[in-house]
Image: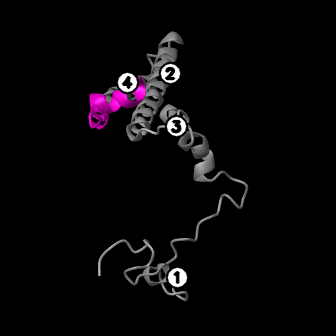
Amino acid sequence: MSGCPFSGNSVGYTLKNLSMEDNEEDGAQTGVNRASKGGLIYGDYLQLEKILNAQELQSEIKGNKIHDEHLFIITHQAYELWFKQILWELDSVREIFQNGHVRDERNMLKVMTRMHRVVVIFKLLVQQFSVLETMTALDFNDFSC
């Protein structure tokens, strides 16, 4: 049998089949549950609720939802987040220079690391264009007018 084991159980799998028997322990879950100790959980820490709900398709509001508008919004939001990170890195490097801490070898390592990070982000941004290029000019025209 093949297929997704979670798609309606049409292939005979269940979550119980895929998990360990109830009486077996592997020790992988022996850590501290930070959520129960008052710490933040992943989704709350990253404020995923805000990010994942920040896509408002104008075409849908106008009553004619255009599929590729979602891709356009997601791609550009990702660009904006990366630009924000680039500015964060550049500001920290500028601060090191402004405070005259460039003679400290550790600070120069920070400068080099952060500038390298900026270069890597720019390379990623160039590669990210290929995702946007999967949308044709006509697809863009559907929701941009």
Labels 1 and 3: the sequence-earlier one = 1
Q: Which disc is residue 63 wearing? A: 3
Res. 55 visible in picture: no
Q: Residues within 10 Å of mark 4 (few under 14, many from 20)?
A: some
Label total for image: 4
Which secondary structure lies at badge 4?
Answer: helix
Which stretch is magenta? 126-145
Report the Cα–Cα distance between label 1 and label 3: 52 Å
Report the Cα–Cα distance between label 3 and label 4: 45 Å
Residue depth check, mark 2 versus mark 3: number of the one nearer the observer? 3
Which secondary structure lies at badge 2?
Answer: helix
Which secondary structure lies at badge 3?
Answer: loop
Labels 3 and 4: the sequence-earlier one = 3
Q: Nearer the viewer, residue 61 or 43?
A: 61
What residue is drawn where x is 67% and y is 58%?
Answer: 35
Compared with residue 111, is residue 49 higher up or lower down, i.e. above or below? below
